[in-house]
Amino acid sequence: MKMPHYSTIDGSSVGYYALLGLLGLLILVGLGAAHHMETEGHWVTGMSNQIVWGTPHVFAVFLIVAASGALNVASIASVFGNPAYKPLSRLSALLSIALLVGGLAILVLDLGRPDRLIVAMTYYNFKSIFAWNIFLYTGFIAVVAVYLWMMMERKMNRYGKAAGFTAFIWRLALTTGTGSIFGFLVARDTFDSALFAPMFIIMSFSFGLAIFLLVLLASYRWAERPLGTEIVFRLKNLLGVFVASVLYFVVVYHLTNLYFTERHAVEAFFLLNGGIYTQLFWWVQVLLGSIAPLVLFYLPQFRESVTAAAVGAGLVIVGGLAQIYVIIIGGQAFPMPLFPGMEVESSFYDGVVAHYAPSLWEVLLGIGGVAMSLAIVVLAIKVLAFLPESLEDPETASAEST
């Protein structure tokens, strides 16, 4: 296969600086929102003693999970030896680092007292999954950075496969660790399931590839570089497989819960009478975020359309955010049993579904984190050669050369 020629983008147009300025403004707004919540206290948020992980956590977890999946393309090229994806490996690795940095920035700012992070990074409780994740997250950035170096430095190319394999294993561990945060929480019936770890892995494949597809389309359109439909449709078809797999895991998760009588109330809450959480599950997560993209990806009327592929990828992202929202917020809203299997009563919201409405500050902090991830990509492709100059279809390229 002919080696692609990489180069930086020009990045001197008004449109480029306007995009960079917009992302910078969103980052500043996000930082301002975090400062407001820090100085005024969490009463300005929608969080309470029952809902302690709010909307910023939804954005943060979504970005962290997607970061692992954004590395799909590079892993397929280097680990599984598919040369069609090799030209996109650099962008894949860059995007995975950028998404993780954005997600972690939200997480640190939302927890309050970011300075106390030093304590968390110097004193470890290895009985906690959160302590493991500190190593998994920071290690992921280091491993992928080394992987990028192996890909971009010609003398180090021979180590690229080994670095890619290490990054592939690490990303699986990272997503397993993130899913296990919920899977290990035995206190809540809505969590406490071994299925969360594999389900988060397949969710990462879907969310990360959807973001990658949109970033690829936007980069080549705005940089005015040729992008063939073959690679786009290849990515779109792969994304469809991941979307169907996520839907399968969701079905298995709920069927598993329905098998246990003690969890019938939880399932009724999510599937039938949970209010906004039931609406988000059926209309946004399942219909809009899963079935609609599959229709756009595979129905004969749409499957040869780049626009349909882009819309489908966008819907996967919307559905993914709804899925994380239902898992995190809905999971906390359902009443927590004080002593499972025992009959006890209390006067503190006993058996009451917790109320939560996201505040503007929380949403702005989440958007600021997304903007930070995108700004990293926009700046990086101007400074270093992450993008091939052409991704034309082989037939088109050979016809032009003759």
Image (cartoon, grey):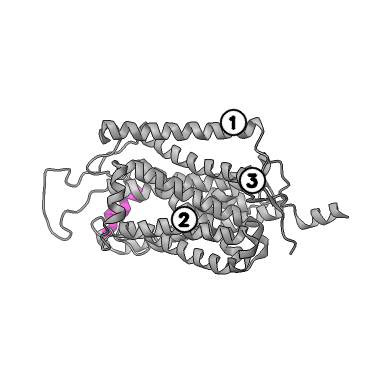
Return the x and y of residue 316 as percentages of the image width and height: 52, 48
Q: Give the mark, 2 or 3, whose residue is nearer the N terminus.
A: 2
Name the residue: 56% across, 63% down.
Answer: 75
CA gap, disc 2 to disc 1?
A: 29 Å
Quarter holding the N terminus is bottom right
Amino acid on which disc 1 is placed: Ala
Name the residue: 54% across, 66% down.
Answer: 163
- Front: mark 3 or 1: 1
Name the residue: 45% across, 60% down.
Answer: 201
Q: Which residues are magenta?
A: 263-273
CA gap, disc 3 to disc 1?
A: 18 Å
Q: Nearer the viewer, residue 165 or 362?
A: 165
Which mark is on residue 18? 1
Amino acid on which disc 3 is placed: Leu
Question: Under tag 2, what secondary structure?
Answer: helix
- C-beta proximity under 8 Å, tags 2 and 1: no
Task: Evaluate whether residue 278 shows in this view.
Answer: no
Q: Give the mark, 2 or 1, whose residue is nearer the N terminus.
A: 1
